[in-house]
Structures are given as structure tokens and as C-alpha cells.
Amino acid sequence: MMQLTRMHWARADSSDFGGQPPVPRSGHTAVGIGKSKVVVFGGFADKRFLGDIAVYDVENRLWYTPECTGSGPDGQAGPSPRAFHVAVVIDCNMFVFGGRSGGKRLGDFWMLDTDIWQWSEMTGFGDLPSPREFAAASAIGNRKIVMYGGWDGKKWLSDVYVMDTMSLEWTELAIAGSAPPPRCGHSATMIEKRLLVFGGRGGTGPIMGDLWALKGVTEEDNEAPGWTQLKLPGQSPSARCGHSVTSGGPYLLLFGGHGTGGWLSRYDVYYNECVILDRVSVQWKRLPTSNEPPPPRAYHSMTCIGPRFLLFGGFDGKNTFGDLWWLVPEDDPIAKRDLVPNVESDSNLSTVTSDAQQYAVKESQSGESPMVDLAKRLGIPLSLEPPASFVDEINDKELLELSTRLIGESLPTTDQLACIQALRDHWRSSSSNSIQLQELGPLLRDYQRLIIRRYVENPSPRFLEREDHRLFHLKNASQLRMDDIPVLLSEYRTLLST
């Protein structure tokens, strides 16, 4: 079986590009035109919709804004400003449909010829789709486009349209049998004559994490269109919307997105892990990365440029991002320039240094510390180790407050260690459904603390051979997924009993 290449995240810096990168935004599109350029269009930032074009010239490593011609509305060359639209490339042309501008859903269809930078509004005929946002679309070969779902302002949609870019005819597919629930904010990707749809938000309640395949999309299929729900082996991604799915050789790369967590009170969760759908083995896998990913986000863009991926923008519930990140193979020059600092050199450490790093630097002067060794064995760069793991129980304020609150009058609160032990006993016997939201932070830190303590006492490779440290790398409880809680409790109980 093919071994997955370990990848490395590197924030793009000024040496990577000339010109002016696009301004921060979310809900935009970024599409690759052949191997020569990436075109960013539209988006939303600072309560306004954007209608600009930014182009990355791959060969010359240059960002620029082309002078586009055309006859758009209000004297503009192209389409009105918008976000949450779809954009699909066929040859050198970028086709744009729908989206949102202000409170209005759009149903117009545009083509940008990227050889001459000319916009044309396309007047289609046939089964015209209704105006919508948060739909998803993909190219079928080098002539047609398939689009599924979206939100029209009143209801979630589950219709499928095929557009012939030569004749400009829209056809709504008549699909018999079972079908996915209506949704928006999903992904839709053509793979081997099938349209794969994952996730999204719909009218059926929570955000979805289901995977569906649609056959009969192409004429060569000679079969009636039909949906099949797929249950693939491996580590499937949690339910989400606003994620990206990018085709990169033998796999599809899923990144980011927005979901919900919690039981008693639902709360928003934004993701930043990479999950791949391996097209060879047909299963979900976690993409191995050698360092910490970018901040979690949704409604970003991820574009494949040869062996590299380029992440841009997005939104995390509070912030709109304008950062650019590379995801590259470990042997890529970009990864090599971004190596983890050498812990032997104080001057190479970042200016913000945690107590844990300072401790590790002191230890390293007399030989490598168990902390550094542990981080290396778990594949965690030293500068990104969870600093809270190094705080003693007595100095973990949240843990103490929680243990005191739990014990109430049964123990003198001055006996802090007894209170902490009682809290640990409580967690040892708790089910995942009974854990409160405010317990997750102290529980995760105590779990990480126990791992480090056990390893310092027993720094042998065998300690790490067991797969019971799957959540050690998390920086805080906001990165926990709902299905991580049973794993956390199980591993925590094991640590308490050893």
C-alpha cells in the first residue's frame, strides 16, 4: 500500500511572493487555471461583499490584479460583488454562478476568460436553477458543470443541475430512489464519474457528516442517475460545513470547516485538521503533518499547485483571515526553511517562550530532556507543546476551582491534593455524556500532565508504542471534537491506573 507523504505547514512570507496578496476575506473562491495561475474572486469582509479579482502567477511567484473588461451591471466590467458563490474552471475559463450580495441571493451565471481577462454574462436556457448561495459545483470533464444543493433564503435545496458550457443549456437531473437530505455549505467533487458530496448544514437539524455518491452524471455512464450513501472505513471526518475538499493526486484533501460541540449547551467548533480520502484504498485517513496547523477556520479556500497546497482566508466565528499558508511535502524547500528551532540555542527560540521551553533548554545543556524526547517521539515540535501540561496540579487554577466545587463540604478545601484526587476519581467513573463543558479544559490538561509525568518516570520507547496518546497534541479543549470525549476519558482512565 502506498505510504502517505508526511506534510508540513508553513506560513507564507514575503520571500514567497511578489506583488500584493489579496485582502482578508471569507466565502470567496480560489481556482487553479492549469498549472499557471490561481484566481481568487469575491468574498466577504468588514460587513461588505467583494467583487475583485486577485491572481497568483505560479511561475513568476507574483500576485497581481488584472484589468478585466466586460459589460457587467452598474458600469462594472464583471459580476456584482458577492460571496458564497460557486466557481468552476474549464480550460482557461472560470465560470461563476450565484452567491449572495447583501440580503439578496443571486442566480446569474458568468464566465471569465483568463487568457484575455474578459467577463461575459452567460444567458442560459433550459431548466434554470433558482438563485442560491452555499451551493457546491464541480467540472465534468472539459465541457460540463454539475451543481448540487444550496440555500435560497427560505429553504435548503437538494436539486442537481448539469450545465453544458458549449450550448449554455441547464438540465435538472431527475433522480429516483433515496437522496441526501437538502443542505448547504457542503462540498461536491467529481471523482471517477461520480459526484461525491460531503457534509453541510441542512433542515434536518444538526450539521451533517455524511458522504454520498451520485452516479449517472455523465452521458457516457449509460445509467440512470442515482444516489448512494457511502460508509467508508478509516477515521472519517466529524460533521461540518464550510470546509474545503481539494483534489491532490491520489487523494482528496479535506481541511477546516465549522461544526458544533457540547451537549447541554451547543457551541461552535472550527476545525484545522487535514483528513484525506485515499482514492486507492478508498478509506478515510488522517494526513500526517510534522507541525502545528494554521488556526481553525471555515469558508476559506485551498488550492492545489503541483505537490503543494495553498490555503487562503476564512472565518472562525470572530476573525476574518487574510493569511496564506503552504501545505508542502517535508522535503520541499519551503518546509526546510521552516525547521523547528534548535533547542540548544537560546537565540533561536521565539521571543515568546513558555516555562516548558525554558525548562527544556536548561535540560538540553546537560543532555536531552525527557520532555524534548517525548515531543520528538510524538511528532510535536517543541515550540508547540501544550504549555499547560507542564503546570503542576497545585498551580492549575481551573482544576483547583473545579475540584473544590465538586467536593463541596465533604473535604476541607485546604487539602488541595485530596480535592484533586476526588476530582480524578469522579472523572474515572464518569461517562462521556455526563462531562460538562467547563470540565473539558482541566480534564485535557490533566491528561497531558499525566502523560508527561509517566514518560519522565519511564522514558522508554515502549511507553509510546501503545496508541493511547492520541490527544496529547491538542492545544486546548476547543479543539476537541464530540467523538474525542470517549477517547479522552478512556485514555485518561488508563493513565490513572498505571
Image (cartoon, grey):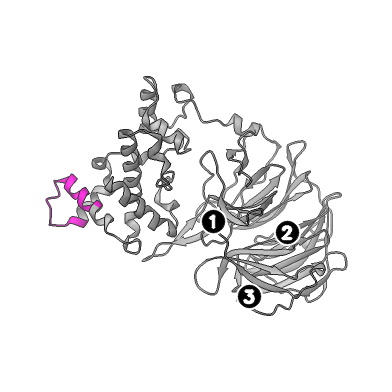
The range drawn in magenta is 406-424
Of the image marks 3 and 2, the number of the one nearer the N terminus: 2
Say above or below: 363 vs 460. above
CA distance separating discs 3 and 1: 24 Å
Secondary structure under badge 1?
A: loop
Query: Which residue is disc 2 drawn over?
Result: 87
Query: What amino acid is labelled 2 in the image?
Result: Ala
Quadrant position of the C terminus in the picture: top left
Distance between mark 3 and mark 2 Cα atoms? 24 Å
Amino acid carrying mark 1 in the image:
Gly
Residue 177 figure quarter: bottom right
Q: Is residue 63 visible?
A: yes
Quick one: 275 or 241, which is closer to the camera? Answer: 275
Residue 441: give its label: none
Between 421 and 241, which is closer to the camera in this rendering? 421
Q: Nearer the viewer, mark 2 or mark 1?
A: 1
Q: Point out residue 363 in the picture as x, y percentages from the top left corner.
A: 36, 24
Please determine whether, in this image, residue 222 is positioned above or below residue 344.
below
Side of 214 relative to 361 (left or right): right
Q: Residue at x 40, y 62 (%)?
A: 262
In contact (CB < 8 Å): disc 3 and disc 1: no
Q: Residue 415 in magenta? A: yes
Disc on the earlier residue, 2 or 1? 2
In this rendering, the count of numbered labels is 3
Q: Nearer the viewer, mark 3 or mark 1?
A: 1
Q: Which residue is mark 3?
A: 179
Q: Which residue is mark 1?
A: 234
Q: Crowding at label 2, few (<14), some or many (≥20) Cα neighbours within 10 Å?
A: many
Q: CA distance from mark 2 to mark 1?
A: 31 Å
Q: Is residue 353 visible?
A: no
Going by the numbered disc 3, the residue's amino acid type is Ala
